[in-house]
Image (spheres, rainbow, N blue to C red):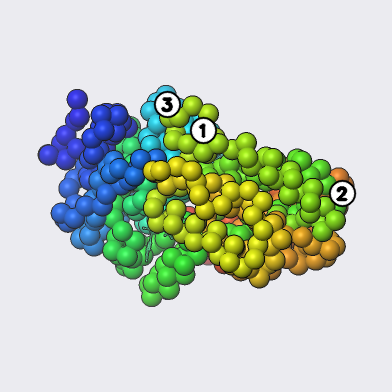
């Protein structure tokens, strides 16, 4: 039975799933402020759509600036007692939440699949696998970090929590982005107000319910749903918010940096990308494209900021690259999360679907050659886009310059290694890259020349404890690992 408190429905995973499975509109309108599920000041609602059926599956509150004021006040009031706990005490809450997700993984994965679109196995691996890792990782880091300070001459240099952090997140890996920010901020001793994406918010509601379930002190974690221009900007401008940790588009990141500048608050930005997969002339093409396509199309239907969407191949191996790319991509069957054999799901929303089709049309109009895919998904409903590979792309084309955020990749020919490096770096972005070569030292030498925050050599596996972030317009600062934790600390020098 759905549990309600003061007429507000608590959006636990169980409550959300009960409604979703019954084809009812799930009630996720409650906000979490000061340790209570509470109604928004605003009666306005935002509808959440199923990517697979286009039906409304849930509602969240279209929150207000007054909601933000309440949440920030609660986070500020909770800060002294929370930051005075030992790291191990704070970490224990993180560990409990991670363990609860693991214990209810099937339910959480089903919510992810219904809200974001990918099949449950993929949801388990990435949408929930990364949060489970990060809750555990930062629990351990909090317990082991030495907050006592370091003697530098006559100074004691101490690290302190920066304070109240606004966490503003996108829809592509909704639980991961919140977990990464919140776990690192809690380990550092900060309190948070989270503003998840209004496009796919349900996993974040379910995680908020876990913080409530484990008895986190009131005010340490707060959740205000709503749109970016209202709730997001109110948080960014708020005089009592000390830091904004943002993941999303470069366009929004620029706006956030400008608004935050008025109150000179710290801003950490994880933004977009247009990453290159550099296949050198001596590389194993099969391996390079298999891993490359999994990363750029297979992972969340291309809705990943690190997607390696520009595949750079030597001109003399272009025909080979096209044949291998077509064969691999045509094994990716699209379908709903609960359809047998689905490899990749639909895109998250109609807006995203139409935007991606617009880019495919631009590629056609600008003279790129379609190797596989195209405008027709072959499906009559759902936000599906057929995985699409363009070849004979040059780096001036719109599809090579702009982030598409869908299952669309470009193959660009180059003449020699120097030109490959030049093209790879010829972008305003700098989030990720990959290099493939039969000679690892050569690949490493090229990797060092690429201006990107994450570079994969010969398929080196993603490391969730390694610093993550972008050069150039892909961001400011780093998330994940110890570097991500340090973003939430201030430095104080006490002269003795
Ligand atoms: P978005 O920028 O549209 O929205 C992200 C969040 O910002 C949402 O919660 C939104 O409501 C909020 N927002 C929007 N306008 C705002 C404003 N003026 N002030 C404050 N908040 C505002 O991005 P999206 O479409 O949700 O996500 C896709 C983008 O995220 C892509 O560009 C992708 O590359 C990027 N991304 C980056 C990373 C990374 O780690 N670098 C990871 C995932 C996604």
**Residue 127 bears which disc, if any?**
none
Q: Nearer the viewer, mark 1 or mark 3?
A: 1
Q: Is residue 68 left or right of residue 389?
A: left
Q: Residue at x 48, y 33 (%)?
A: 119
**Residue 106 bears which disc, if any?**
3
Q: Residue at x 54, y 46 (%)?
A: 386
User: Label 1, on which residue?
Assistant: 342
Observer-nearest residue: 111 or 472? Answer: 111
Decide which of tag 3 and tag 2 comes sooner along the chain. 3
Report x, y in % for residue 92: 43, 33
> Is 419 rendered above or below residue 202?
below
Marks 3 and 2 sit apart, C-alpha to C-alpha, by: 43 Å
Q: The N terminus lies in which quarter of the figure?
A: top left
Report x, y in % for residue 390: 65, 56
Q: Residues within 10 Å of mark 1 (few under 14, many from 20)?
A: some
User: Label 2, on which residue?
Assistant: 282
Asked whether mark 3 and ligand 1 are closer than 8 Å, the reply comes as: no
Q: Nearer the viewer, mark 3 or mark 2?
A: 2
Q: In this rendering, does residue 256 appear at all?
A: yes
C-beta proximity under 8 Å, tags 3 and 2: no
Report x, y in % for residue 370: 64, 55
Picture quadrant where residue 162 is located? bottom left
Observer-nearest residue: 148 or 489? Answer: 489
């Amino acid at each position: 039975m759905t549990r309600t408190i003061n007429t507000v429905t608590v959006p636990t995973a169980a409550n959300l799933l009960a409604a979703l499975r019954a084809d009812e509109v799930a009630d996720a309108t409650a906000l979490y402020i000061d340790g209570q599920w509470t109604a928004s000041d605003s009666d306005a609602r935002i509808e959440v759509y199923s990517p697979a059926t286009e039906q409304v599956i849930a509602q969240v509150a279209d929150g207000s600036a007054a909601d933000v004021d309440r949440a920030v006040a609660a986070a500020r009031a909770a800060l002294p007692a929370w930051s005075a706990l030992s790291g191990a005490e704070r970490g224990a809450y993180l560990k409990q939440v991670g363990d609860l997700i693991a214990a209810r993984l099937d339910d959480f994965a089903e919510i992810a699949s219904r809200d974001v679109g990918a099949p449950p196995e993929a949801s388990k691996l990435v949408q929930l696998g990364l949060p489970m890792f990060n809750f555990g990782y930062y629990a351990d880091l909090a317990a082991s970090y030495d907050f006592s300070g370091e003697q530098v001459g006559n100074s004691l240099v101490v690290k302190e929590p920066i304070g109240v952090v606004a966490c503003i997140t996108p829809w592509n890996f909704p639980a991961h982005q919140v977990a990464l920010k919140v776990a690192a901020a809690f380990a550092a001793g900060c309190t948070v107000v989270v503003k998840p994406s209004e496009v796919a918010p349900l996993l974040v509601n379910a995680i908020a319910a876990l913080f409530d379930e484990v008895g986190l002190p009131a005010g340490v974690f707060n959740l205000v749903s709503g749109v970016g221009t209202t709730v997001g900007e109110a948080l960014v401008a708020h005089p009592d918010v000390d830091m904004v940790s943002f993941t999303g588009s470069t366009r929004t990141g620029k706006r956030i940096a400008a608004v935050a500048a008025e109150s000179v608050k710290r801003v950490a930005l994880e933004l977009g990308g247009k990453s290159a997969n550099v296949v050198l002339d001596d590389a194993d093409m099969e391996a390079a494209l298999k891993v490359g396509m999994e990363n750029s199309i297979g992972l969340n239907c291309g809705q990943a900021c690190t997607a390696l969407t520009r595949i750079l191949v030597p001109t003399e191996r272009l025909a080979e690259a096209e044949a291998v790319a077509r064969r691999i991509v045509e094994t990716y069957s699209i379908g709903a999360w609960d359809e047998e054999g689905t490899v990749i799901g639909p895109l998250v929303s109609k807006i995203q679907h139409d935007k991606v089709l617009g880019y495919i049309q631009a590629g056609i109009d600008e003279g790129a050659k379609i190797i596989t895919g195209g405008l027709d998904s072959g499906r009559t409903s759902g936000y599906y886009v057929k995985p699409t590979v363009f070849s004979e792309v040059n780096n001036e084309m719109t599809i090579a310059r702009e982030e598409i955020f869908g299952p669309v990749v470009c193959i660009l020919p180059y003449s020699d290694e120097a030109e490959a490096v030049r093209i790879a770096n010829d972008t305003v972005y700098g989030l990720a890259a990959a290099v493939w070569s039969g000679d690892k030292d050569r690949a490493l030498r090229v990797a060092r020349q690429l201006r990107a925050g994450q570079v994969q050599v010969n398929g080196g596996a993603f490391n969730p404890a390694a610093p993550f972030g972008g050069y150039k317009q892909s961001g400011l600062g780093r998330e994940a690992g110890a570097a991500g934790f340090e973003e939430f600390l201030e430095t104080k020098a006490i002269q003795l």
